[in-house]
Image: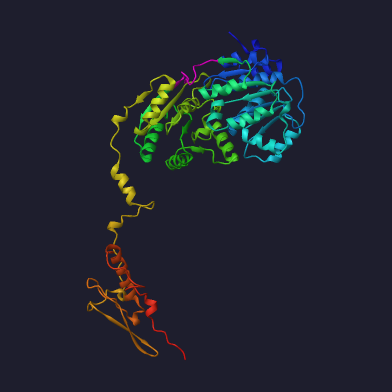
């Protein structure tokens, strides 16, 4: 049986690995570490949770024992798609490199440039960053990439999904062509294969599992649910309670950040120990939330796909897909958060009638038929239409908002309907110079306008509203000239002219 001492690692690295409690390497580690120490390019393909991070961290530590970094000229570069993955790799370097005196710089968003600049000025043996923040430092003239000896592209398929490939191509042009490149991914679609062919020179290909396969230690089940969010949330709550005996902690995945926030509030209202993690949160909140979950202060973590790739939380017992992922590759990464390092885990996915095409794509990609729990979609009860209709009639405060049943507002006494007048009415307004008659042509099918000075024109205003309402219902009459019959009341108020 192969041990870490058989892989050619330095004594300092072997000591740190032993102190961490590891003696036998995983298949990806046993296959990648020896050629990496020979400075060969590597294309590593392995399902998540198999130790890909240590596959490049351990040989890099051995190779970096010779030499020293210069200011603003890093010796090695590791590209990660998310801040959490970058921070996790930095933790691995600190754990396995405790016997080394290496400067490690972490360049991610959400942290001030000044603090990162100070680390770069001291010289970085290992530079771990997200592509966007690295390019920001390069454009500010704070980095020179001509001294990079080793380039690591981690979670390459996630880089593709997040649109980082153009940034990676720009970065690769800044690095010497003679570099060593280590390329790792959990899945290998055609686009990623083309990218690997462009970046790697005569690589050693290590493939320890079928591409896009899931861990055999994870029990997978799919659960039928209605599409209504409140019914899906009820199914999820029942599912969590039914697994309470075996559930130590769990990650619940949603497709949208808004759904993460809504589901978090719902579970919190129902008394669950829950936190939320998504891309719109500031870096401090994301770091604190993830640390609380790792330390066991939170039992449930509702997250977007920002938590689906590469996060090493070894003892996650359950994964729940509240939304079935749109991209089938994401399913492999999500359920890979459980059943890590040989442990057993469970993954449950809620499936609605709208998700059948996504389910078919997942089964086709993984090559396995997922088992239904408690019946398929045909066994679902009818949606709660009465509850849904009631919600449409009621606001958030529970008040009836059905306008067809609302009571008509009573009129004030001054707003009482005017008495019926003859078909042709004459309104006389006294003027300082005499009386002038203002005639308005009246239609025989409408009541005439009535103006009462003592009521400040309330009756006239009310009658005008009735007329405008009538015009909306019967607009086939002749086009009025000027104001027509709707002379505003304020124009009929008597004004005393001063000599």
| Residue located 46% across and 89% down the image | 498
Q: Position of residue 105 (x, y in %)?
A: 69, 31
Label count reads: 0
Q: Is residue 4 left or right of residue 431?
A: right
Q: Is residue 474 above or below residue 3?
A: below
Residue at the outermost top position? 1
Give the magenta range.
207-218
- Classify residue 76 as left or right of residue 466: right
Q: Is residue 210 magenta?
A: yes
The one of 410 and 154 positioned closer to us in this rendering: 154
For image coordinates 30% across by 32% down, the residue present is: 380
Side of 91 where 103 appears, left or right: right
Image coordinates of residue 85 in percent, x first then y, are 59, 30
Q: Please indicate whether residue 152 sits to the left or right of residue 405 in the image.
A: right
What colouring style does the render use? rainbow
Q: Is the magenta stretch mostly helix, strand or loop?
A: loop
Residue at 65% x, 30% y is 171
- Residue 487 position within the rendered picture, expressed as x and y whole percent measured from the top left: 35, 75
The location of residue 409, given as percent across then percent down, is: 31, 66
Magenta highlight on residue 127: no
Q: Is residue 56 above or below residue 228?
A: above
Classify the position of the N terminus by image quarter: top right
Quarter of the image where one finds residue 41: top right
Give residue 125's quadrant in the image: top right
**What residue do we see at 39% from left, 38% from top?**
233
Q: Up-down: is 474 above or below 156?
A: below
Question: Could one spot residue 20 in this view of the protein?
Answer: no
Residue toward you, 224 or 273: 224
- Note whether residue 138 is visible: yes
């Amino acid at each position: 049986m192969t041990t870490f001492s058989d892989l050619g690692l330095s004594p300092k690295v072997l000591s740190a690995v032993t102190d961490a409690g590891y003696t036998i390497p995983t298949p990806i580690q046993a296959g990648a570490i020896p050629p990496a120490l020979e400075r060969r390019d590597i294309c590593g393909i392995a399902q998540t949770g198999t130790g890909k991070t240590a596959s490049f961290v351990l040989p890099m530590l051995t190779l970096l024992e010779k030499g020293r970094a210069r200011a603003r000229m890093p010796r090695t570069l590791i590209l990660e798609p998310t801040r959490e993955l970058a921070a996790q790799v930095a933790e691995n370097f600190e754990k396995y490199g405790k016997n080394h005196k290496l400067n490690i710089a972490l360049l991610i968003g959400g942290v001030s440039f000044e603090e990162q600049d100070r680390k770069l000025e001291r010289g970085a043996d290992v530079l771990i960053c997200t592509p966007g923040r690295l390019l920001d430092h390069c454009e500010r003239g704070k980095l020179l990439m001509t001294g990079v000896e080793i380039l690591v592209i981690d979670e390459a398929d996630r880089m593709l999904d997040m649109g980082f490939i153009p940034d990676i191509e720009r970065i690769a042009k800044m690095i010497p062509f003679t570099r060593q490149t280590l390329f790792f991914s959990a899945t290998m679609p055609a686009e990623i294969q083309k990218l690997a062919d462009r970046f790697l020179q005569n690589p050693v290909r290590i493939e320890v599992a079928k591409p896009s396969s899931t861990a055999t230690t994870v029990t997978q089940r799919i659960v039928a649910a209605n599409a209504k969010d409140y019914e899906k949330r009820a199914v999820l709550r029942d599912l969590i309670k039914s697994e309470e005996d075996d559930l130590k902690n769990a990650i619940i995945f949603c497709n949208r950040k808004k759904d993460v926030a809504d589901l978090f509030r719902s579970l919190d209202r129902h008394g669950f120990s829950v936190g939320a993690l998504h891309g719109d949160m500031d870096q401090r909140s994301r770091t604190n939330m993830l640390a609380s979950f790792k330390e066991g202060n939170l039992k449930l973590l509702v997250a977007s796909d920002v938590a689906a790739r590469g996060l090493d939380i070894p003892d996650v017992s359950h994964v729940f897909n509240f939304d079935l992922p749109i991209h089938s590759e994401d399913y492999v990464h999500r359920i890979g958060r459980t059943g890590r390092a040989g442990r057993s885990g469970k993954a449950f996915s809620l499936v609605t009638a709208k998700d059948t095409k996504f389910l078919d794509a997942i089964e086709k990609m993984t090559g396995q038929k997922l088992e239904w729990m408690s019946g398929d979609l045909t066994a679902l009860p009818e949606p709660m239409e009465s509850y849904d209709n009631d919600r449409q009639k009621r606001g958030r405060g529970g008040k009836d908002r059905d306008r067809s049943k609302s009571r008509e507002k009573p009129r004030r006494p001054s707003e009482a309907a005017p008495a019926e007048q003859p078909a042709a009415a004459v309104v006389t307004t006294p003027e300082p110079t005499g009386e002038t008659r203002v005639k308005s042509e009246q239609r025989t099918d409408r009541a005439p306008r009535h103006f009462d000075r003592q009521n400040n024109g309330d009756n006239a205003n009310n009658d005008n509203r009735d007329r405008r309402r009538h015009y909306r219902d019967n607009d086939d009459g002749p086009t009025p000239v000027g104001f027509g019959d709707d002379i505003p009341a304020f124009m009929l108020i008597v004004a005393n002219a001063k000599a």
